[in-house]
Amino acid sequence: MWPHILCTFGGSVIGTLLIQRMDSGFLSKLLPFLLIGFSLYFLLSPRISNDDSQQRITPLAFAFLIGTSVGFYDGFFGPGTGSFFAIAFVALAGYGLAKATAHTKLLNFTSNIASLIFFALGGHVLWSAGLAMAVGQYLGARVGSRMVVSHGVKLIRPLLVGISLLISLRLLWQHYF
């Protein structure tokens, strides 16, 4: 996973540095529609399971293409990053959903650490809110990991679809109503 981690870290650093210099308004309006598309993919795709399938790109190509671009997105804007990584692991790397979710957590953590470092260096961190969110993320990851291992796709698929749709609705409401 080292190439994936390095590319994700680098992409996130670039996104974090860029967002500190510009407005992210366009992405915030586009994101709900992207998340709805991913939700529909997870909902309607018959091939999503815990079983690995055929790999469509090499691990190194995945690291450069997905790690860098999704890392950039997470550093630049952020919401839905886990869904983007998960869909890429399933669709391109051929991972089963449980394995994709585990790898997603590692890369999402990587991009979050990179962003934290470079937002902190830029003086743009609300430490008390960030610490509370970090504790919540840690606890959620612990509970979620156990649920993935015990329930697999039966749990992950509806959660990915539901959470992506809820985030989409919230963002649509914020920007259009």
Image (cartoon, grey):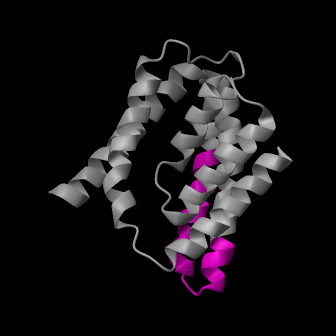
The answer to whether 131 is drawn above or below residue 112 in the figure is: below
The secondary structure that most of the magenta stretch takes on is helix
Residue name at image x 41 percent, y 18 percent: 44
Percent x, y for residue 158? 44, 27
| Residue occupying the far right of the picture | 2
The answer to whether 138 is drawn above or below residue 95 in the figure is: below
Location of residue 110 (image quadrant): bottom right
Residue name at image x 77 percent, y 47 percent: 4
Give the side of residue 64 with respect to residue 101, left or right: right
151, 117: nearer the viewer: 117
Give the side of residue 19 with respect to residue 143, left or right: left
| Residue occupying the far left of the picture | 177
The total of numbered circles placed on residues is: 0
> Which segment did they paint magenta?
116-141
Residue name at image x 64 percent, y 62 percent: 12
Visible residue check, residue 131:
no
- The C terminus sits in image quarter: bottom left
137, 31: nearer the viewer: 31
121, 125: nearer the viewer: 121
Residue name at image x 63 percent, y 68 percent: 14
| Residue occupying the far top of the picture | 46
Visible residue check, residue 46:
yes
Q: Is residue 16 magenta?
A: no
Q: Is residue 125 magenta?
A: yes
The answer to whether 56 is drawn above or below residue 22 in the figure is: above
30, 106: nearer the viewer: 30
Percent x, y for residue 62? 71, 39
